[in-house]
Amino acid sequence: MEDRKIKVLMCCLGPETHNRGIIVVSTILKEEGMEVVYMGNTTAENALRAAIEEDVQIIGVSSLSGAHLRTGKHLLELAKHKGIDKSIAFVIGGVIPPNDVKILKDMGFYDVCVSGTKREELVTVVKNAANTVG
């Protein structure tokens, strides 16, 4: 199997108005040699369409608004409906209450990076997530 550069689509879903976190994370991933498709604020439908077109391994979702359970569930349900829930790994991060981490993982997110996640941990999460998909 050839070594494939990790390709991540980064987006905010729903009523997000803050973008500092997603920009910082996108920059870190680029500095670590990953390819980043930056969507900014978008819909789940557009994020999945772009993920398919761009052939990404991971969709990273930034959430600061508190809508992570609703928007995350919608994204994962739509991915399952499209039959791509196993070919793309999903990671979510941002202002996520500790009690919601298990809920999000049980929903189908590979991992959850809460505020304050260190650079090294973030990079490890993304690399490990990429290894779970083809």
Image: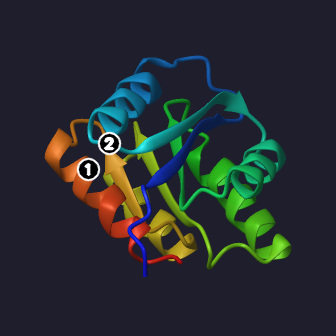
Q: Quadrant of residue 5?
A: bottom left
Q: Quadrant of residue 116?
A: top left
Q: x and y percent of residue 22 in the render?
A: 46, 29
Nearer to the camera, 7 or 2: 2
In the rendered image, the vertical position of residue 80 relative to residue 74, given as above or below? below
Q: x and y percent of residue 50 in the render?
A: 75, 46
Label 2 neighbourhood size at 10 Å, few (<14), some (14-19), many (20+)?
few
Can residue 27 be seen at all in this image of the molecule? yes
Residue at 32 percent across and 61 percent down: it is 127
Residue at 49 percent across and 31 percent down: it is 64
| Local SS, label 1 | helix
In the rendered image, the vertical position of residue 49 relative to residue 133, given as above or below? above
Which residue bears the numbered disc 2? 33
Looking at the image, do the residues carrying marks 2 and 1 touch, with CB atoms under 8 Å apart? no
Q: x and y percent of residue 6 in the render?
A: 43, 55
Which quadrant does the N terminus fall into? Answer: bottom left
Nearer to the camera, 72 or 59: 59
Label ID, residue 123: 1
Q: x and y percent of residue 133 in the render?
A: 51, 76
Label ID, residue 94: none
Can residue 118 be seen at all in this image of the molecule? no
Q: Amino acid at mark 2?
A: Gly
